[in-house]
Image (cartoon, rainbow, N blue to C red):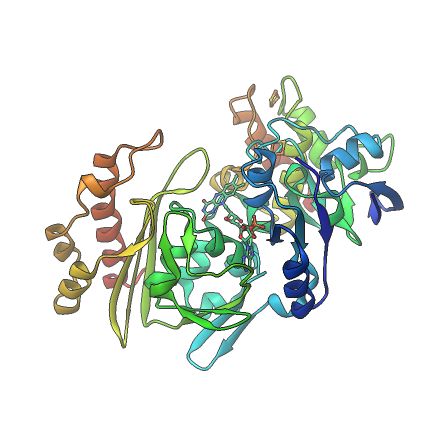
Amino acid sequence: MQDFSYQRPAALTAAIEAFEQAEDGRFLAGGQTLLPVMKHRLATPSDLIDLAGISDLEGISIAGSALSIGAMTTHARVASAAEVHDAIPALAKLAGCIGDPHVRNRGTLGGSIANNDPAADYPAAVAGLNATVYTDRRRIAGDDFFTGFFETALEEGELITRVEFPVAAAACYQKFDDPASGYAVVGVFVSRGSQGVRVAVTGATPCVFRMRDLEAALNRKFTPETVSGFCVPEEECNDDLHATAAYRSHLVGVMATRAVAAITDGEM
Amino acid sequence: MATLTLTVNGKPVSAQAEANTLLVEFLRETLGLTGTHVGCDTSQCGACVVHLDGLAVKSCTMLALQAEGTEVTTIEGLAPPGSLHPMQVAFHQNHGLQCGFCTPGMVMASVALVTDNPNPSEPEVRQGLAGNLCRCTGYQNIVKSVIAGARAMER
Ligand SMILES: Cc1cc2nc3c(=O)[nH]c(=O)nc-3n(C[C@H](O)[C@H](O)[C@H](O)COP(=O)(O)OP(=O)(O)OC[C@H]3O[C@@H](n4cnc5c(N)ncnc54)[C@H](O)[C@@H]3O)c2cc1C
Ligand code: FES
Ligand code: FES
């Protein structure tokens, strides 16, 4: 890794200030993506601003009918927290199937969604549950947050503080994981609540997206069979060493069917 | 350079580290604790697993400075000098290693796994070791070792 300067401020304002003063600053959360990227010299920041010293960014609470999770909360904490299991069990399950135990002990919610890897899991939950992303300066609707391949609506130096997930009546995440990395070859998050059905797909295309035509059909008739009339065309799917586009296109239907079936059977 | 202060294997440590020094480099090169291995340096293999405040982490995917104020346990600190931890004994007795390169990470990951789940099933052991790769054993005897180690840790 090339050299950089490191600091761990204890307050949010100090972190923002440090970013503004840095020539080419980067926030450091769990480091499970940023450090490997820096080892490959795909990122060469002048300053790393470690968010681990800001205790306000960590924690899980129920706020009205929503679950609020701090940006620095680790995947392991979300996977094991009683509040998450009670409110949105599908979210606990999703966090518990990210990577491996060691990655889950360091990796965070904020880092995952800021990075917006096309094969990451959390983006499916943010889009699939209509979550709201809170930053140091505003709130961003889950539907507007992920804007493209490794791209988000975050501005330069904008810091995610927490994410609010509305509690849905029922939700399920089905993931077909890559056996080597654990990342999603395809993952489908289905939720059913007072605002209707949501279907978010990760892994299949360059960025997480909602299958709105399938959502409309499931709003009329919520059965696994409904899924069979809908697909993501092969031409839109990622094609790489992990899976062909045709395979991914097929997997979207399989994972969506399983998620709907699990919800109708009540076994989320 | 910054001064890094932490506890390693129960002993207070204070030493200089560059910002870009990885925790595994600090342990191996500054402190001479070469039991922690580097298999891939790309966060895949788990040979570098240590415990940070009791949680298993990949020490190749952490900066040394991120460990400021923490308690780190390496394979050297698992049992008092001259003795073996029950999980180490179980790996020995069940032939849970061949070349031994992955073993420090396997043992550290296994102890963390059993601390969380004292009586793991075979699938739970396999899932719990998803972040640890072995190029030799085919995992059968590693899984056997962890289950035996878990029983021995209960005693
Ligand atoms: C072996 C391995 C397997 C993995 N498997 C999976 C998997 O199956 N599924 C999956 O989804 N992920 C997987 N990951 C990625 C993992 O979930 C990472 O933890 C995550 O992508 C990044 O989170 P982090 O906290 O480590 O962030 P970092 O690596 O510290 O940061 C990532 C990026 O986010 C920015 N950032 C971090 N926090 C904030 C914030 N609060 N506000 C604004 N910007 C911020 C950083 O500046 C950086 O650009 C895997 C990683 C590894 C090493
Ligand atoms: S050396 Fe750290 S994961 Fe391989
Ligand atoms: S025993 Fe050789 S790598 Fe595992």
Viewer-proximal residue among B80 and A151: A151
Q: Nearer the viewer, residue A166 or B103?
A: A166
Q: Can residue A2 be seen?
A: yes
The residue lying toward the viewer, choosing from A48 and B96, is A48
Q: Residue at x 36, y 56 (%)?
A: A147
Quarter of the image for the N terminus of chain A: give it: top right
In the image, farthest residue toward the bottom: A64
Can residue B33 be spotted in the picture?
A: no
The image shows residue A204 at horizontal and vertical percentages of: 29, 44
Position of residue A262 measured from the top left corner of the image (x, y, whole percent) = 27, 57
Q: Position of residue A102 (x, y in %)?
A: 59, 44
A212 to the left or right of B91: left
Depicted A151 relative to depicted A140: above or below: above
Ligand 3 visible in quadrant? top right
Q: How many marks?
A: 0
Q: Is residue A213 left or right of residue B19?
A: left
The quadrant the C terminus of chain A occupies is bottom left
Name the residue nearer the viewer: A222 or A111.
Answer: A111
Where residue A254 sits in the image (x, y, percent)?
22, 46
Q: Residue furthest left?
A: A229
Residue at 26%, 75% (x, y): give it: A195
Q: Residue at x 65, y 49 (%)?
A: B115
| Left or right: B77 as drawn, with respect to A241 | right
Q: Quadrant of residue B26?
A: top right
Identify the residue at horizontal 58%, vertical 46% (top origin): B119
